[in-house]
Image (cartoon, rainbow, N blue to C red):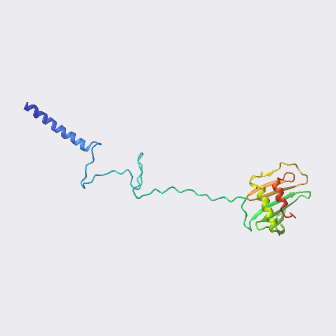
Amino acid sequence: MRAIRAAVVTVALPVALVLGGCTSEGSDDAPATPGASGTVPTVSAEPSPGETPSPGQTRTPSPGQTRSPSPTPTTTPTPTGSQAPAPGETLLRVTRSGGFAGRTSSLVIKGDGSFTRFDAKAKQTGTGRLSAAELTALRTALREADFAHLPRVATSGGTVFDGFTYAFVHGGYEVTTADGSIPPGLTAVLGALPPFE
């Protein structure tokens, strides 16, 4: 009986030592043991600067570190044709061509009401200035004509033989039309213009 107990102790003791060693060092479930300094080493999920995080690893800001939001793009408003030009800028340019004599002439009207006449060769043929009331009437007609929604070429009416063709340029829009097809809004603009010649 003593011999059996001695054999069991002899076999069980080394097995317990081996298993105990595996449990304390090789098992993932075992708690970490203090190192030489008495502190438990920790593994950080945050990579060091210059290190690329591995797949599945999330990066969280450390205490005191804030994550700055991505910049929001800003847009600059685009000027529209309804804005009044500065006094020296062009408010309206109208070129009239055709007629019985087949002449071409243009009017360039500035924001301050001053205007210049040109012939077919762009040679200046005269200047003048609209009164305050005339300039107001022209601005009102231009606003009501709504150039942004006019067809670029307005030719829906009938043809007038020996009639004029007009090209209006205002607020970044160009509209071409002819006698017999002039939209009502542009008829009001033509009525507010000084003479072409």
Answer above or below: position of 186 versus 111.
Answer: above
| Closer to the camera in the image, 154 or 18 | 154
Residue 2: image x %, image y %?
A: 7, 32
| Closer to the camera in the image, 104 or 12 | 12
Location of residue 30 by image quarter: top left
At 11% from the left edge and 33% from the top edge, which residue is drawn?
Answer: 7
Left or right of 49 in this view: 128: right
Location of residue 110 by image quarter: bottom right
Total marks placed: 0
Residue 76: image x %, image y %?
A: 63, 59
Left or right of 53 in this view: 118: right
Q: Residue furthest top?
A: 1
At 83% from the left edge and 65% from the top edge, which residue is drawn?
Answer: 117
Residue 126: image x %, image y %?
A: 85, 68
Location of residue 97 by image quarter: bottom right
Residue 129: image x %, image y %?
A: 82, 69
Q: Residue furthest left?
A: 2
| Closer to the camera in the image, 91 or 125 | 91
Q: Residue furthest right?
A: 100
